[in-house]
Image: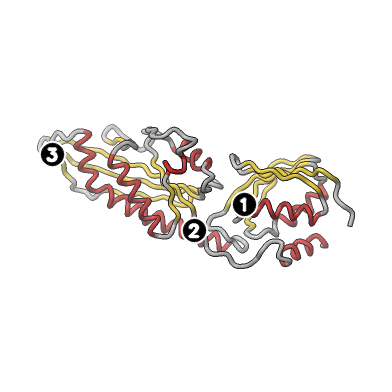
Amino acid sequence: MSRIVGAILFCMAGLMPIAAYAEDRANILVMGEDADERGATLDTVVVARDTRVFKQVLEAISDSLAQDGFDVYDERAVTLDNFKQNRVGRTEAELLDIARSVQRPPIDAVAIFTVYAGARKLAYTTDIYARITGRVVNVHTGQKIGNFEVTAPRGVKAPAGCERDCLLEVIGRNAKSLGGDLGTVLSQQITTAEAANRATAKDAPRALPGAYTVVFSGFAPDEISDVEEYLVAFKGYKLHRPVTTSPRSTQYWYEIDSDSARLSRNLRMMLDRVGAEGRITFSSTDNTFTVEKTAPAKIH
């Protein structure tokens, strides 16, 4: 009980500010999947990243999200130093790996789109088909926030014998409009997810939940019980689950609406409150905090 009271006082004493935060919006990266692995048929192809149609859709989705108040970042600008540029045929797995690796700024969600194009050739004309699918994934948790697709209106025609370049030219006339429509829907879905998160998380200061692995090393089981009372008291706490436990080490999956700097600060103050000396390290590569006790708990 004393530890619970201490955790409550920890929040109230100003060690962890409880003043209202401005409602931050998600940092978003818009990326296109152009690997021909799914959804394509003999009459339908996936539009590659190095085409004008692809770029039109990318810009339209990005503009739509930015207009709705999200911070949308240019992929090339934030990946220029550490990733090979201009790759085509990229899969969703590659895109998520890139998005999770970007730390300046940290990305909250990635909007992934795929453009499909097709044609049915007739003796007198060519029927054009275009479809864009989009989905938004929380980079921290891997949860899908939403998905949607838009299709070009029926009746779009091209000259008889229309080949690849001709096909892309005709589709390009509708690409920007379709991308804007898709961006609008994805924006609404992200906004809904933000509102739901703020409604369910305790005093959530962030738009979308963050997820961390937190490892406590050198703590006895009774000390871990004390630690858990503080973990659930942190501002923006959402949930935690033990992943692995042993007599001297416990690992948690920890979801909280807090950036890594604030969580690091709270963990340090928590150590002081439980009377233990320790070392805290953080790996941005996999969002892992390691809290290693270096001295026995002090006797108060």
Quadrant for the N terminus, please. Answer: bottom right
CA gap between label 1 and label 3 equals 55 Å
First of labels 1, 3 by sequence position: 3
Mark drawn on residue 255 = 1
Q: Residue at x 27, y 52 (%)?
A: 177
For residue 286, side relative to residue 49 (left or right): right
CA gap between label 1 and label 2 equals 18 Å
For residue 17, side relative to residue 144 (left or right): right
Mark drawn on residue 264 = none
Q: How is the image coloured?
A: secondary structure
Q: Secondary structure at mark 2?
A: loop
First of labels 1, 2 by sequence position: 2
Q: Residue at x 40, y 60 (%)?
A: 68
- Closer-to-camera residue (4/12): 12
Residue under label 3, please give it: 159
Q: Residues within 10 Å of mark 1 (few under 14, many from 20)?
A: many
Q: Is residue 219 above or below residue 19?
A: above
Residue under label 2, please give it: 25
For residue 222, side relative to residue 29 (left or right): right
| Total tally of numbered discs in the picture | 3
Percent across and percent down for residue 48 are 33, 36
- Residue type pointed to by label 1: Glu
Quadrant for the C terminus, please. Answer: bottom right
Q: Residues within 10 Å of mark 3 (few under 14, many from 20)?
A: some
- Residue type pointed to by label 2: Arg
* Farthest-out residue, left: 124
Percent across and percent down for residue 107 are 51, 48
Residue 37 visible somewhere in the drawing:
no
Q: Secondary structure at mark 3?
A: loop
Percent across and percent down for residue 21 are 57, 64
Q: Is residue 131 above or below residue 36?
A: below
